[in-house]
Image (spheres, helix red, strand yellow):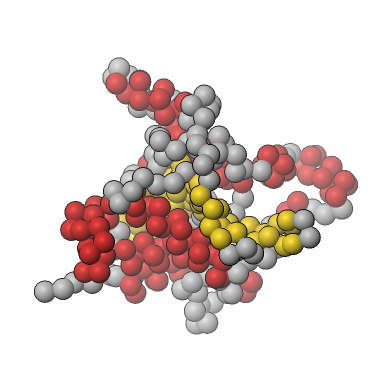
Amino acid sequence: MSDRFERQRALFGDEGQGRISNCQVAVIGAGGLGCFVAMELAYLGVGRIAIVDPDCLERSNRNRLVGGWDSHEDGEAKVSIAHQLVERIDPNIEVDAITAKFPDPVALEAIKNADYVMGCVDRDGVRLELNEFICREDLRLVDAASDTLPDGDVLAYGGRVCCVFPETGCLVCLQVLDPASIQAEFASPEQQADWKAIYGVERSDLGESGPSVVSVNGVVASLAVTEFMVAVTGLRAPFAKLEYLAHRGVVLRSLDSGDPQCYFCSMRLLGRIDEKNGRITSVET
């Protein structure tokens, strides 16, 4: 007798489907990317999903928030909308909807308990903090980002996916984070005032004001979930970095790999050494 995963079993077998079903995943961010990721994880049959996001539905989100129906009121928690979406796909999936932001203690606990973490956050400052936590706790992160930026005379749009695994490296040594964005995000009020004086705009006004389209988010999210799928089932080794250049209609696989001397990646090794010696399981920095 066939089941809902019959066509998936044809690709990665009963063992692969079993690994997915027994997997616990934390999705950090339930916006345009995170809602797509949560939906696809549910269709794959992931057994337990924790969804973390502090934000609520706004009118400007409705062009890309999968599961955000017209019947949803502005102000409803995004994690609640994602929870409802997963439940409609498969009510047997355990869902933890956490209205909190990283690094809230509740969010940290959900991440620690996960087998895999899917990063779907908007800002590189949060990505840096998440990257450090993942390396320090020796966890596995698939980070997804969509973006729009000038490329000469052309408007470039698309995104990228990075796998922060022991064998691939991290977001820092893969050189995907924007130092200027991180510096501005963590700036003091005085530095923020300087920013306004120099650029004539409040840093907070930049927010999510850049272009964001559901179809581009969908491609990036699917690339991220595919890297999760191949890693869990063993279909192939995950790629360190994929770049989706939507304006060119191509996906590039980067040949970059992590730096063995990377400060953040070295946290994994230090944690393992201490665990082996029976002292501590992670290293605070």
The residue lying at 30 percent from left, 51 percent from top is 235
In x, y percent, where is residue 99? 48, 57
The residue lying at 72 percent from left, 41 percent from top is 180
Q: Is residue 79 above or below residue 132?
A: below
Examine the rendering and report whether any part of residue 77 can be seen.
Answer: no
In the picture, which quadrant includes the N terminus? bottom left
In x, y percent, where is residue 18? 21, 55
Res. 81 image quadrant = bottom left
The residue lying at 50 percent from left, 74 percent from top is 68
Identify which residue, 44 or 97, lies in the foreground: 44
Horizontally, residue 232 falls left or right of residue 53, namely left
In x, y percent, where is residue 39? 40, 67
Q: How many marks?
A: 0
Instruction: Work out which residue is located at the far top of the displayed protein and give it.
Output: 277
Res. 191 image quadrant = top right
Identify which residue, 164 or 203, lies in the foreground: 164
In x, y percent, where is residue 144? 51, 53
Horizontally, residue 201 falls left or right of residue 55, namely right
Q: Is residue 111 above or below residue 59?
A: above
Examine the rendering and report whether any part of residue 172 can be seen.
Answer: yes
Instruction: Work out which residue is located at the far bottom of the displayed protein and give it.
Output: 71
The residue lying at 60 percent from left, 69 percent from top is 213
Horizontally, residue 89 falls left or right of residue 9, namely right
